[in-house]
Amino acid sequence: MTHDQDTGRELTRLAVSATIHCLTGCAVGEVLGLVLATWWGWGNGPSIVLAVVLAFLFGYSLTIAPVLRSGLALHTALKVALAADTLSILTMEIMDNAVVLAVPGAMDAALTDVLFWGSLVASLAVAFLVTVPVNRALIARGKGHAVVHSYHH
């Protein structure tokens, strides 16, 4: 194996790791937002807004917490999280919500419907697959989640 192949595999590994990290925060926010909005009987627009806001909140929180533990001040940790995660979370949220909206009846499904949970799982899987190359490109340029890694040790 050549050095370029090793480097490419390492970039992909880091991108997958960063995307799993992003997916975790997004999934928590999406699931919580859609569950609450469905439970409260909200329409599609408010449901999506709540889910996206919570996805960003949880996504940034998962980055800020370990960065704060590394000794950075809150203001600096917020800047690191915004720089590291914004494009990743945005990509994931666009794809996730596009898929859920594209599945007929998904936004009208009840919490007890397989359609509700199935469309949500499928949307997160698609979002993951689309976001990995975005994170890989960012990391290759020393941006995105690459910024955070220096604070994780």
Image (cartoon, rainbow, N blue to C red):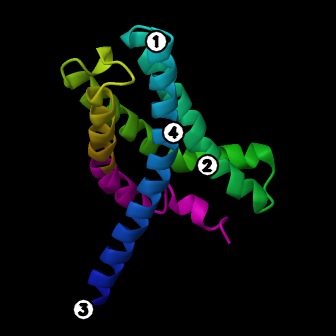
- What secondary structure is found at the residue carrying circle 4? helix
Label 3 to label 1, Cα distance in Å?
A: 51 Å
Q: Amino acid at mark 3?
A: Met
- What secondary structure is found at the residue carrying circle 3? loop
Query: Which contiguous range is marked in magenta?
Result: 129-153
- What secondary structure is found at the residue carrying circle 2? helix
Relative to 80, is 69 above or below?
A: below
Q: Amino acid at mark 1?
A: Pro
Position of 70 with respect to 143 (left or right) is right
In this rendered view, identify the residue nearer to me: 28 or 92.
Answer: 28
For the residue carrying disc 3, how many other residues have a C-alpha within 10 Å: few (<14), some (14-19), or many (20+)? few
Q: Earlier in the sequence, mark 3 or mark 4?
A: 3
- Quarter of the picture holding the C terminus: bottom right
Question: Comparing marks 3 and 4, which lies closer to the viewer?
Answer: 4
Label 2 to label 4, Cα distance in Å?
A: 11 Å
Please say whether residue 143 is one of the residues in the magenta stretch: yes
Q: Amino acid at mark 2?
A: Leu
Residue at which label 2 appears:
62
User: x, y (%) of residue 40?
Assistant: 51, 11
Label 1 to label 2, Cα distance in Å?
A: 24 Å
For the residue carrying disc 1, how many other residues have a C-alpha within 10 Å: few (<14), some (14-19), or many (20+)? few
Q: Residue at x 32, y 76 (%)?
A: 9
The quadrant in which residue 92 appears is top left
Q: Are marks 3 and 1 in contact (CB under 8 Å)?
A: no
For the residue carrying disc 2, how many other residues have a C-alpha within 10 Å: few (<14), some (14-19), or many (20+)? some
Which secondary structure dominates the residues rendered in magenta?
A: helix
User: x, y (%) of residue 114?
Assistant: 28, 30
Which label is found at residue 46? 1
- Quarter of the picture holding the N terminus: bottom left
Question: Comparing marks 1 and 4, which lies closer to the viewer?
Answer: 4
Question: Comparing marks 3 and 1, which lies closer to the viewer?
Answer: 1
